[in-house]
Image (cartoon, rainbow, N blue to C red):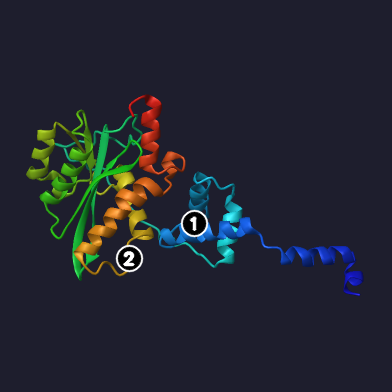
Amino acid sequence: MVCSAFGIARSSYYEHRRSRSRIDVERLEQRAKVNELFTQSRSSAGSRMIMTQMQGEGYEIGRFRVRRLMREMNLTCKQPGPHKYKQATVERPDIPNCLNREFEVQAPNQVWCGDITYIWVQNRWYYLAVVLDLFTRRVVGWTLSDRPDGALVVKALEMAYEQRGKPAGLMFHSDQGSQYASRTFRQRLWRYRIQQSMSRRGNCWDNSPMERLFRSYKSEWMPATGYISASEAQRDISFYLMERYNWQRPHQYNQGQPPAVAEEKLNLLSGNG
């Protein structure tokens, strides 16, 4: 009677019953993978990022399927809030803005960027300094300290310089923070034969790749209440920067490839690998 009332063939009803009793193994596998990647991202990955990662692992899946699976499992990604930037045109006369927002470079170890952000650790502020290679936006150096002095940025630079094989012909770009203008840091740049470039005062867009990195870390990964201890912060930040950000997290600048993966592929294509 119900089939007749809605104009549906009885055979369609029975076919629907049979299909409900069958287990869709592929769908279950996709659901499990979506949940795994979402959990690994600490609830920060959206449908686009998860789709990119799954396709990179060989899954044939589109964004709408990922979005539907996330909705079924009530997975909602964290979204960063709006960020307001102050505009300014004042430039430090002795350290000009040599980079001038030319963020696309042709090879590794041509232009590095640096910046500092603050992290709540053990009921006090700690300071994180990071060095980024603009070629594929790869993190090449970092350090964490409870003192925001010149030694903080020197240690991050030292790590990058040693790990990248002491490259020559570099430019280092940063904002006009006192740490980057300190005698300690500038002397280290002189020793490494690195050209210094500085953003205009208060203009964050002059160093936007670093702003994006810190925004991703704070909105996607950093615990909302900070870290219990300095050792916990060291481990967690190290994993995010050197493993998740460099090797796992898809980056829009690299057409969905993580920075370290993109750099290795480009080096092989150019014959430098």
Q: Which mark is residue 203?
A: none
SS at circle 1:
loop
Q: Residue furthest bottom?
A: 1
Q: Quadrant of the N terminus?
A: bottom right
Asked if residue 211 shows in the view, the reply is no
Position of residue 160 relative to residue 67, above or below, is above
Asked if residue 11 shows in the view, the reply is yes
Q: Residue 59 in the image: state x and y as whole percent.
A: 56, 48
Residue at 36% across / 51% down in the picture? Answer: 244
Residue at 28% across / 59% down in the picture? Answer: 236
Compute the Cα span from label 2 to label 1: 18 Å
Q: Is residue 116 left or right of residue 268?
A: left
Residue position marked by numbered label 2 in the rendering = 223
Residue position marked by numbered label 1 in the rendering = 46
Dot 1 surroundings within 10 Å: few (below 14), some, or many (20 or more)? many
Q: Quadrant of the C terminus?
A: top left
Q: Is residue 67 left or right of residue 156?
A: right
Q: Quadrant of residue 18?
A: bottom right
* Number of numbered callouts drawn: 2
Q: Quadrant of residue 101?
A: top left
Dot 2 surroundings within 10 Å: few (below 14), some, or many (20 or more)? some
**Residue type, label 2:** Pro
Q: Residue 114 in the image: state x and y as whole percent.
A: 23, 45
Q: Is residue 64 left or right of residue 198?
A: right
Position of residue 125 relative to residue 85, above or below, is below
SS at circle 2:
loop
Q: Residue 84 in the image: state x and y as whole percent.
A: 35, 56
Residue at 16% across / 37% down in the picture? Answer: 95
In the image, 54 versus 101, the foreground residue is: 54
**Residue type, label 1:** Gly
Position of residue 160 relative to residue 122, above or below, is above
Q: Residue 48 in the image: state x and y as whole percent.
A: 51, 51
